[in-house]
């Protein structure tokens, strides 16, 4: 069970046919976006060649003059992450169509922020991990080493750098949740 955007999602255990099932989930995502009259040409969903790998799933689309996107990467397999993306999209599109949320609220949920991507890259540099690193355990290990080194109570500590490290870790944690 994972909790995302206020929703609890029961992620099934995928034991076989990972790639075929990933394609089925991809088709469900496309069908969900089609309910908003978004065609495949306005959707970008990079499918992982091996759906068993630990890779974040991300879908982006163009809707009502805005670039929107959603990604998830905390599960242990791409197919599980893709499943969570599918369920979040399905829930939010249903809420929009049922008029539980406004179009503006929907946009805010999924707004794509290119400057945010730059901030995430800089945060990863601050913590000394690769720009595309999504392994939160590795990121946390680097964070702990740097936080201990720069803690203001430690000899040679640097309060400003300590705050920068904390902010970087918090930003990445928010992205990967």
Image (cartoon, rainbow, N blue to C red):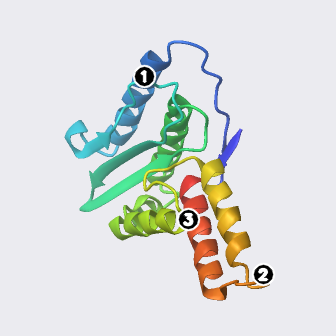
User: Which marked residue is nearer to the observer: mark 3 or mark 1?
Assistant: 3
Residue 127: which disc? 3
Residue 4 visible here = no
Residue found at the very far right of the displayed protein = 153
Residue at the spot x=56%, y=65% of the render? 127
User: Is the Cβ of the residue at disc 3 closer than 8 Å to that at disc 2?
Assistant: no
Q: Earlier in the sequence, mark 3 or mark 2?
A: 3
Is disc 3 placed on a helix, strand or loop?
helix
Whether residue 2 can be seen here: yes
User: Dividing the picture into quarters, in which one does residue 157 lie?
Assistant: bottom right
| C-beta proximity under 8 Å, tags 1 and 2 | no
Q: Name the residue under label 1.
A: 24
The structure residue drawn at horizontal position 60% and vertical position 20%, both measured from the top left corner, is 14
- Please state, as top left, top right, bottom left or bottom right, where the N terminus lies in the image: top right
Q: Which residue is drawn at 23% across and 45% down?
A: 42
Marked residue nearer the N-terminal end (3 or 1)? 1
Q: Is residue 39 above or below residue 52?
A: below
State the residue position of label 2. 154
Secondary structure, mark 1, is helix
Q: Which of these two is toward me, 152 or 72?
A: 152
Structural crowding at the residue carrying mark 3, measured as other residues with C-alpha within 10 Å and reported as few (<14), some (14–19) or many (≥20): many
| Residue, far top | 16
The image position of residue 56, as x and y in percent, is 49, 42
Earlier-in-chain disc, 1 versus 2: 1
- Please provide percent x and percent y for residue 164: 58, 78
Tell me the element at label 2: loop
| Residue 38 falls left or right of residue 76 | left
- Quote the CA–CA distance across marks 3 and 2: 19 Å
Please tell me whether mark 1 or mark 2 is closer to you in this view.
Answer: 2
């Amino acid at each position: 069970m994972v909790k995302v955007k206020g929703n609890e999602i029961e992620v099934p255990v995928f034991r076989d046919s990972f790639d075929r099932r990933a394609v089925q989930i991809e088709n469900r995502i496309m069908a969900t976006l089609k309910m908003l009259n978004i065609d495949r040409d306005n959707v970008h969903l990079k499918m992982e060649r091996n759906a068993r790998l630990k890779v974040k799933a991300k879908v982006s689309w163009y809707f009502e003059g805005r670039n929107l996107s959603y990604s998830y990467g905390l599960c242990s397999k791409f197919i599980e992450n893709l499943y969570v993306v599918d369920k979040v999209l399905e829930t939010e599109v249903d809420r929009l169509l049922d008029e539980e949320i406004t179009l503006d609220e929907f946009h805010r949920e999924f707004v794509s922020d290119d400057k945010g991507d730059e901030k995430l890259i800089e945060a990863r540099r601050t913590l000394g991990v690769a720009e595309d690193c999504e392994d939160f355990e590795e990121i946390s290990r680097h964070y702990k080493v740097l936080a201990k080194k720069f803690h203001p109570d430690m000899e040679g500590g640097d309060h400003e750098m300590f705050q920068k490290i904390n902010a970087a870790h918090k930003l990445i944690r928010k992205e990967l949740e």
